[in-house]
Image (spheres, helix red, strand yellow):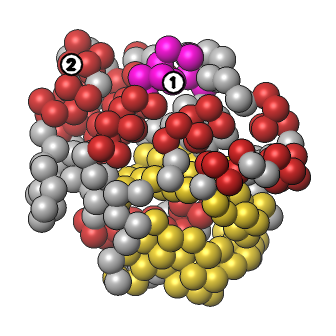
Amino acid sequence: MLKLSGVHAAYGQSLALHGVDLDVAAGEIVCLVGRNGAGKTSTMRAVMQDQIRVTEGGVSFDGLSLPGMAPYQVVRAGIGYVDENRRVFASLTVLENLRVPRMPARAGMQPWSMDRVFTLFPPLAEYRHRAAGVLSGGEQQMLAIARSLLTNPRLLLLDEPHEGLSPKVAEEVLAAILELKQSGVAMLISEQALFAVKRCADRICIIDRGLVAWAGTPAQFDASPGIAEKYLMVHARSRQEAPRSRS
């Protein structure tokens, strides 16, 4: 479905990716892990053609070459994106945020509707008339994911979906991710919370210095403790449990 081949990418003249190779199959969850600044977000932006320029290599989705497209064209092609800043419209209500991105259903997939995202995220139904700017961080994360789902994506990119969430809300978001997986939505997730990675990932890719340094299944990751020690360091020790609340 998604394939990155030898991708180099830059912000202006500053190179951020140095030959990334990875792929995501239909219905699969691939998690990107790595230290801060390793290139996880840059990899996602290279897929979305958002703020970064692919200078070498290929990025394709269902055979469609993505470099040179505008981000909205990538979304129309069937890729949803929830970046680490969530980008909700603070002055609009939950309902108004959800009415912005409506797009036709994709062939062979059950279409996303307002009722369906409210079933996935019940707090949004309760707060549907509340301004997005007064929602908690966890509720804004739910809103950002729900809004992206209403574009009816075949592939969903989530950048740090558990960052700053309380353990309870983190579990709710993880449960939604697992439910989405059951519905057939493929996902590429940038994540530092290993408790979530090990429960949802089909494959793990460790990004280090703008390259995929290691890739394998969660079982292979657990069988190779030296990998976490080498590439993740503090994340491997301190992010085993659900993140502490910042919202």
Residue pictured at 79% horizontal, 28% vertical: 238
Which residue is label 2 attached to? 125
Q: Residues within 10 Å of mark 1 (few under 14, many from 20)?
A: many
Chain-order first, disc 2 or disc 1: 2
**Given the image, on which type of amino acid does mark 2 rest?**
Ala
Is residue 18 rendered to the left or right of residue 80? Answer: right
Residue 199: give x, y in percent of width and height. 53, 37
Whether residue 229 is visible to the viewer of this picture, yes or no, is: yes
CA–CA distance in space, label 2 to label 1: 18 Å
Look at the image and give the residue range highlighted in magenta.
Answer: 164-173
**Numbered circle sitting on residue 170:** 1
Is residue 154 rendered to the left or right of residue 58? Answer: left
Q: Nearer the viewer, residue 82 or 173?
A: 173
**Numbered circle sitting on residue 32:** none
Residue 234: give x, y in percent of width and height. 84, 36
Q: Secondary structure at mark 1?
A: helix
Q: Is residue 223 above or below residue 49?
A: above
Whether residue 55 is visible to the viewer of this picture, yes or no, is: no
Image quadrant containing the C terminus: top right
Residue pictured at 78% horizontal, 38% vertical: 236
Q: Quadrant of residue 54?
A: bottom right
Dominant secondary-structure state across the stretch colored magenta: helix
Q: Secondary structure at mark 2?
A: helix
